[in-house]
Image (cartoon, grey):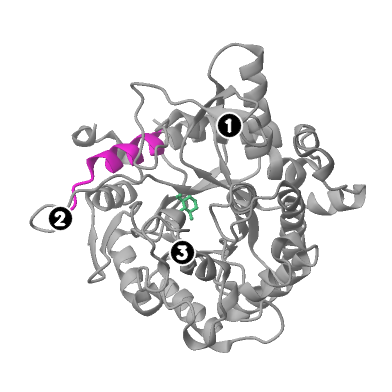
Amino acid sequence: MTTFPANFLWGAATSAYQIEGSPLADGAGENIWHRFSHAPNNIADQSNGDVACDHYRRFRDDVHLMRELGIGAYRFSTSWARVLPEGVGRVNQAGLDFYSRLIDTLLENHIQPMLTLYHWDLPQALEDRGGWADPRSADWFAEYAQLMYRAFDDRVPLWCTINEPWVIVDQGYVEGRHAPGRRDWAEAAAVSKNLLCAHAAAVDAYRAVGKHAIGLVVNLVPIHPASDSDADRQAAQRLDAYLNRQFLDPVLLGEVPPELPQMFGADWPNWTADELRRIRQPIDFVGVNYYLRLRVCDDPKTGLARARAVTQPNCPYTAMGWEIYSQGLAEILLWIKERYGDVPQYITENGAAFDDISLPNGAVDDAPRVQYLKEHLVAARRAIEAGVNLRGYFAWSLLDNFEWQCGYSKRFGLVHVDFATQRRVPKSSARFYSNVIRTDGAALEDKTHA
Ligand code: IFM
C-alpha cells in the first residue's frame, strides 16, 4: 500500500472575508463583499461578514486549535483592502501587522503558511474604478502582490495568486450571485482575460523578489455527458472548456480553448501572441479545489455553455446539492498530469457542507463528512500511486464560516462554530482528520469509519 509521501502537507483552508470579521477595523478599506452583502437580498440569510468567525481577534486560539489537531499547514487569504485601503497607493500598516502576527503565530506552532493573495474581496475603491473589467487591474494586483511578497516572503513558503478565477467570472459577472453581482457576458469575457493578466503580473513580480513557490488555484469538476448522444457530449465538452480549461490552458499551454471565442462570440477579447507568452510563464504548482462532478445535457437555453446539469436519483449529494463523487478527484489530478505534464499539485480545497446535528452535550458527530473526507483522501492516494506529484491536501474548511451567497446556512467546517457565542467545537471529522495526519494516512484503513 502506497503511503503519502514524506513531507506531504496536511492542511486546512479558509479565506479572509469568510472568517475574519471586523472588515473595516484599524483603517481597512471597504471590499466588494462588504458592499454586496450589505445590500438587500443578496445573501440567503441576509447576513454578512461583519463578525463571521471573529478570527481577526481570535486568530491565536484558532492557530492553537490547529496545532492541537496536528494540522501542519494553513491556507488562508489576505484581504487586499486591509493592507491597501484604496487598492493601490497608501499602505495601511495595521493591516500588514495583523497578517504578520498571524504568520508568526503559525510558525511558532510549526504550521506552514500558504498565502492566497486574492480570494474574491476586491477593494471597493478599485471596483469603483472599473474593477476586474478594467485592464489596469493587472497593475493594481501586481502592486498589491509586491507589497505582500516584500512583507512576508521571508516567512511564507507557498503563495497562490488567485483563488478560483472561474467562479469570479461565472458567479460575479455571468450569474450575478457573487460580488460585484453583474450579469454581462462582455464584461465577463474581459474579466477572464484581465484575471489571467493579473495572475501573470503577480508571478512576474514574484520572480523578481520571491524565493519560494507560487501557483494558481482553480476549481475543477469532472464533466460527464448525461447520455451518449452527440449533443450531450458536445455540451460536456463546452462546459469543460468554460469551467476546467479556461484558465489552465492559457497558463500551462499558452492557448485559449477554441470553444471560448465560439461561446462568447464578438464579446471575446483579442489576445496577442505576446500576451499569451506572458501568461504562460512557469508556475511552481497548481492548486486544485475539488468538490463535485457534473452530469450535463445539451440545453440551448442554459448559460454560456448551453449545458444543463442533470441530477441523478440514488446518488449522494451534499447540503449544497453537489454530487459526492470521490473518484472524480483522482480523475482530475490525473487529467492535469496527462494534459499539462508533471506539474506539482496541491489539493488546496476539498470538503462538504452537511446539515450537522449538535448533540445535547454540544458534540457534533458529522459521520457524512468523515465518510466524505475518507473517500476523497483514498482517491488522492490513488492518484499518488498512479504517479501524480501531489504535495499536500487542505481540507475546506477549518471552521464553519460565511458561505458567500448562502450566508451562515451552509457549514463546511471541521470545527463547529456557534456564531452566537463564537465557541469552537471540533466535530468528529476534525478528530478523524487528526488521526489521519498523526498516522500519515494509515487511519484511512480504520474500518470504524467505513
Ligand atoms: O467556500 C468556498 C470557498 O470560498 C471557495 N471554494 C468553494 C468553497 C465552498 O463553496
User: Which class describes the residues within 10 Å of circle 3: few (<14), some (14-19), or many (20+)?
Assistant: few
**Which residue type does callout 3 highlight?**
Pro
Residue 309 in percent (x, y) is at: 52, 29
Give neighbour class at mark 1: few <14, some 14-19, many 20+ (Cα, 10 Å): many
Q: Is residue 133 left or right of residue 439?
A: right
Which residue does the image show at 39% across and 33% down from the upper left?
A: 324
Q: Residue at x 33, y 54 (%)?
A: 409
- Residue 363 shows which numbered tag? 2
* Image quadrant where one finds the C terminus: top left
Residue placed under numbered mark 3 in the picture: 40
Q: Which mark is residue 334?
A: 1
Q: Nearer the viewer, mark 3 or mark 2?
A: 3
The amino acid pointed to by label 1 is Leu
Determine the CA span between mark 1 and mark 2: 38 Å
User: Quick check: 102 above or below 27?
Assistant: above
Mark 3 Cβ and ligand 1 under 8 Å apart: no
The kind of secondary structure element at disc 3 is loop
By secondary structure, the bulk of the magenta-drawn segment is best described as helix
* Magenta residues, start to end: 363-378
**Circle 3/circle 1 CB separation < 8 Å:** no
Seen as rendered, the residue at the extreme front is 40
Query: Count of labels shown?
Result: 3
